[in-house]
Image (spheres, rainbow, N blue to C red):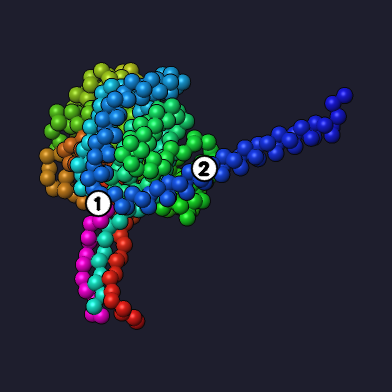
């Protein structure tokens, strides 16, 4: 007979074993974080040429390791639902790997923001004072799916002499492991401590350890869904820089060039719908709604775009295959797929009010030939990137000439817009005296 006592002992043993495993996992994570902190300090003694040459070696290694990266990536992709639009973020191919290598080379040629002297002066007592840009220290990134982000963040942090901790998602685990192997091997071959770039385990304990590692981690950057970003923001004791989700808008004003407007909207929606700078809501002035929708319709039909429309747009789209009635939730949704919301508005005032209510402060655009309306839109819309007569798809570090980016920051402190190399520094005051006392 299986006694209650025996059952209790088995349960207790299992619970203790689980606690021991968790303790070991937590201890391992803490050790990795501390090692990265130590390695980050050694980066400050590297010369600029060593950093550049190491990054160029890394670009070569990425190209040489294309086959291994694609094999690991396929092992991740094959586990996903093929109909999930987010699979596009996860998938690598030869062109994307080549683009990663090219991006690393471009970053290697960018000026190192660390060490720049911001201000110099002498105090009345003779102390020489300088304000200098210095690395943030250890940057931790928590991100979903996109394996190119592993290379982007590692490259940007190394170029600016920061250590980095990478917490990717389990969906990209094989790809991220292959990537970190290439990165750390290259660092070691160039005489640099590999621990300055660390891939943390995908276990859930990792995030909790990062949240409390205030002694070892200087900033956490979440990159991914709104849910992930808000979770990190609400729970981390370490300072957080948000790279926000994009609920992006394009307003087609009544004086818009309709052909131009259609081209911009189609590009912003279909060129790569799974990214944060793709348009989510299209606002159309009622004066041009009929003619604009008539010309947009065949383009959206071609790409099988699903539209959630307000009543006026719904009537104008009558018979469109993929049409639904818009809800409040639709207007607040980052679709990351071939879906969008559409609303007919009375004028620019209603368009601005709608954007103010639903925007996540990422990227918004107006299409109009009225310069005064465009300038008003650019002044009043409070987003990281605001456009007149151009696609929102340009909100990107590479497109802005900043090189690779960690993400698009939608907050106002420290970094806003493409969070690239130039913002991976803080400031330090250096004072050189000769015995002065106060």
Question: What residue do we see at 41% from left, 37% from top?
Answer: 143
Asked whether 122 falls inside the magenta stretch, the response is: yes
Identify residue for label 1.
113
Classify the position of the N terminus by image quarter. top right
Residue 364, percent from left and from top: 26, 41
Q: Secondary structure at mark 2?
A: helix
| Numbered range of the magenta stretch | 114-125
**Vertical order, 302 against 269 (above or below):** above
Question: What residue do we see at 14% from left, 28% from top?
Answer: 259
Q: CA distance from mark 1 to mark 2?
A: 30 Å
Question: What residue do we see at 23% from left, 19% from top?
Answer: 298
Identify residue for label 2.
29
**Vertical order, 290 against 229 (above or below):** above
Residue 433, percent from left and from top: 28, 74
Relative side of 159 to 226, left or right: left
Asked whether 414 falls inside the magenta stretch, the response is: no
Q: Is disc 2 surrounded by few (<14), some (14 to 19) or many (20+) residues within 10 Å?
A: many
Question: What residue do we see at 39% from left, 40% from top?
Answer: 194
Circles 1 and 2, Cβ within 8 Å, touching? The answer is no
- Can residue 260 be seen by looking at this rendering? yes
Relative side of 255 to 325, left or right: left
Relative side of 382 to 165, left or right: left
Task: Identify the image quadrant of residue 329.
Answer: top left
Q: Earlier in the sequence, mark 1 or mark 2?
A: 2
């Amino acid at each position: 007979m299986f006694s209650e006592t025996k059952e209790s002992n088995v349960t207790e043993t299992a619970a203790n074993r689980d606690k021991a495993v968790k303790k070991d996992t937590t201890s391992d994570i803490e050790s990795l974080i501390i090692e990265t902190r130590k390695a980050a300090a050694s980066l400050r003694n590297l010369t600029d040429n060593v950093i550049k040459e190491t990054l160029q070696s890394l670009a070569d290694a990425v190209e040489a390791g294309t086959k291994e990266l694609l094999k690991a990536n396929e092992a991740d992709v094959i586990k996903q639902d093929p109909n999930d639009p987010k699979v596009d973020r996860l998938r690598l191919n030869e062109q994307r790997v080549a683009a990663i290598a090219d991006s690393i080379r471009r970053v290697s040629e960018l000026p190192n923001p660390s060490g720049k002297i911001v201000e110099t002066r002498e105090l009345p007592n003779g102390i020489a004072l300088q304000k200098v840009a210095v690395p943030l220290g250890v940057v931790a990134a928590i991100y979903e799916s996109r394996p190119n982000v592993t290379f982007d963040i590692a490259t940007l942090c190394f170029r600016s002499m920061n250590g980095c901790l990478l917490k990717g998602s389990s969906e990209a685990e094989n790809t991220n492991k292959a990537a970190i192997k290439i990165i750390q091997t290259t660092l070691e071959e160039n005489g640099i401590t590999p621990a300055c770039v660390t891939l943390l385990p995908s276990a859930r304990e990792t995030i909790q350890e990062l949240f409390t590692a205030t002694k070892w981690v200087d900033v956490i950057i979440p990159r991914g869904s709104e849910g992930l970003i808000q979770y990190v923001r609400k729970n981390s004791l370490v300072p957080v820089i948000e790279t926000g989700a994009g609920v992006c808008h394009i307003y087609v004003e009544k004086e818009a060039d309709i052909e131009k407007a259609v081209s911009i909207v189609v590009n912003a929606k279909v060129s790569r719908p799974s990214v944060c700078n793709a348009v989510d809501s299209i606002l159309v002035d009622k004066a041009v709604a009929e003619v604009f929708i008539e010309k947009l319709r065949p383009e959206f039909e071609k790409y099988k775009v699903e539209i959630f429309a307000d009543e006026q747009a719904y009537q104008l789209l009558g018979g469109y295959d993929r049409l639904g009635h818009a809800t409040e939730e639709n207007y607040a949704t980052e679709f990351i797929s071939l879906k969008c919301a559409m609303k007919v508005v009375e004028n620019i005032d209603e368009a601005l009010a709608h954007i103010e209510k639903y925007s996540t402060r990422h990227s918004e655009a107006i299409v109009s030939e009225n310069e005064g309306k465009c300038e008003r839109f650019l002044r009043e819309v409070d987003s990281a990137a605001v456009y007149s007569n151009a696609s929102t798809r340009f909100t990107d570090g590479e497109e802005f000439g900043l090189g690779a980016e960690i993400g698009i920051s939608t907050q106002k402190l420290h970094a806003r817009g493409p969070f690239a190399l130039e913002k991976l520094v803080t400031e330090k005051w250096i004072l050189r005296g000769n015995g002065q006392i106060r």
